[in-house]
Amino acid sequence: MSTEPWWRRAVVYQVYPRSFADSDGDGIGDIRGILQRLDHIAALGVDAVWLSPVYVSPQVDNGYDISDYQAIDPTFGTLADLDELIEAMHARGLRLVMDLVVNHTSDQHPWFQESRDPASPRRDWYIWRPGRPDPDDPGATLPPNNWSSVFLGSAWELDPVSGEYYLHSFTPQQPDLNWAEPAVRQAVYAMMRWWLDRGVDGFRMDVINLISKPEGLPDAEQGNQLEMVVNDPGLHRYLAEMRREVFDAYPDRTFLTVGEMLAVTPEQAVLATDPARRELDMVFQFEHMDVDHGALGKYDPQPLDLRALKASLARWQEMLAGQGWNSLYLNNHDQPRVVSRWGDDVRYWRESATLLGGVLHLHQGTPFVYQGEEIGMTNYPFARPEDYRDVEAARAYEIATMMGLPEELILGSMARMSRDNARTPMQWDGDAEAGFTTGRSWLPVHQNHLWLNVAAQQDDPHSVLSFYKRLIALRKAEDVITTGSFRLLEPDHERLWAFVRESGDQRLLVVANVSGDPLRLPAGDPFAALDGGRLLIGNYPDGAGDAPGGAEGGAGAEPGVLRPWELRAVYV
Ligand code: GLC
């Protein structure tokens, strides 16, 4: 029996169902839409799909607020549709990883509704506390502690029914489950087994490092609850218990588990992903995605400092090597589109989209491709507050306005950072609604769908789509990408992203020019070997590795010079 789990050589594709493909013309994507577009996913060569939530939900946070874990929201279809999806995917050799959102439920979940009654046996399924007396107003109370929610504002909501506050790490409509209550954990595990019995191949676990709260819920120094919660040691107990109670019940199957972990350190990630500790397979960390956050956080975006980005990823490569396992991503449904964020989506759109994807995929770990990334989809030109649909954007706008920040500044940051950028419809073709729906889409379609779409890139060997297909295929063919060691070169260079991957006698040099100006490579080893080496992949047509006759190092380029946003990976 092979000891290497399948996900070590896998690439995962993320589907955000609301925006992927609409089969019934209501303007919202659905499961039958995914079925219709499965050939596109299979043709990419990926191994698995992570499907964002399709469970019954009031959709306050687009399905990340679940009111029934074991049924499909009618917006997305039926359980029969989902069974069909599992079957159709398995028939194509694709696995299905479902989203598991168990830090919180919807406030409409029957568990929470029952829990609001202090006498209910489910009272302890959520986190209820009396308020603190308000020194300024004898009749009133203040929240039990100073924690703020991830979506800003207090993390506590006073429930008029029971006169106590409940904890919500996200919106008030997303009350946190109380994992300290054994019955909660057993209910979650039973639900997970129910999905695995249906054929599901794993879970992406939403904000999983928030489930264990510190004893006594003490005030946070900075008022930010994350600093109190994310390193709580109880997490590892729960994850190990989940492994035993859920996944160990299927000794003949190998699942994929990836835990989304806010503010996680590499040390914590090693604990969570060291195979010997039997917790998770990998985590989604945020350090590299936060390098452009300013003093006020996410909605205070700063220009990219490449040194910080490459140092962060390199640190995770080194710290997890041989111990844990990395996930690799630059896009998902919570992040603006990376080609707009850190690339150049105007002048060097194709080059920068492929450079960013290429550099990421040549790190060690399991890459995740977010829908639309494989064709280089860009941010949407949001202008007015009412253009947004995301609950996080609405809260950020409200709070920034309350703080008295200038409207222009707020709208500018929202346009750059809003999650809605990732959620505009998938661009299938140049038709009115980009082939996403026959009706009217729930979020506007980007105008650039006229030329930026799957159909236009399908048969073009130099398209972003064709590049991603080659990249995904490389992972299967080249052992050094999966197993090779990682060494960052020129860490202080502001435009050059360079590293070496090594395994046995294979030595792969990756160089990328993260700028719109030509870049002369440093002299000496290993850069001197670039032009004479065997090109594995590059993002300029004349040095793309698929050029007739087999290109060397990158014909068309001046020796030792990278062109704007050029990437090359060369065996040296
Ligand atoms: C995760 C999800 C995000 C959601 C939040 C609350 O970060 O990816 O979309 O809003 O958790 O569930």
Image (spheres, grey):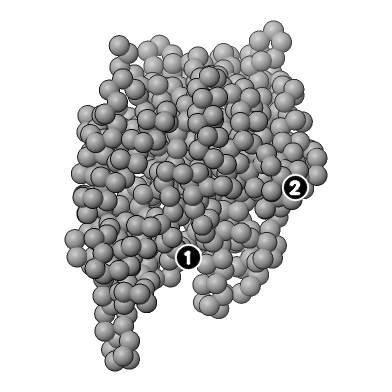
CA gap, disc 1 to disc 2? 39 Å
Identify the disc placed on residue 296.
Answer: 1
Q: Between residue 52 and residue 272, name the one nearer to us.
A: 52
- x then y, percent, for residue 208: 34, 47
Side of 406 where 10 appears, left or right: left
- x then y, percent, for residue 84: 54, 29
Identify the disc placed on residue 179.
Answer: none
Side of 172 where 435 appears, left or right: right
Q: Residue at the spot x=26%, y=47% of the render? A: 185
- x then y, percent, for residue 186: 25, 45
Of callouts 1 and 2, the N-terminal one? 1
Q: Amino acid at mark 1?
A: Leu
Q: How many marks?
A: 2
- Secondary structure category for the residue under label 2: loop
Q: Residue at the spot x=53%, y=66% of the render? A: 396
Q: Residue at the spot x=70%, y=55% of the render? A: 381
Identify the disc placed on residue 439.
Answer: 2
Quadrant of image for the N terminus: top left
Q: Between residue 145 and residue 553, name the one nearer to us.
A: 145
Picture quadrant of residue 481: top left
Q: Are marks 1 and 2 in contact (CB under 8 Å)?
A: no
Picture quadrant of residue 452: top right
Crowd band around label 1 with a 10 angstrom C-alpha radius: few (<14), some (14–19), many (20+): few
Q: Is residue 225 above or below residue 200?
A: below
Residue 423 visible in the picture: yes
Q: Amino acid at mark 2?
A: Gly
Crowd band around label 2 with a 10 angstrom C-alpha radius: few (<14), some (14–19), many (20+): some
Residue 538 visible in the picture: no
- x then y, percent, for residue 171: 45, 63
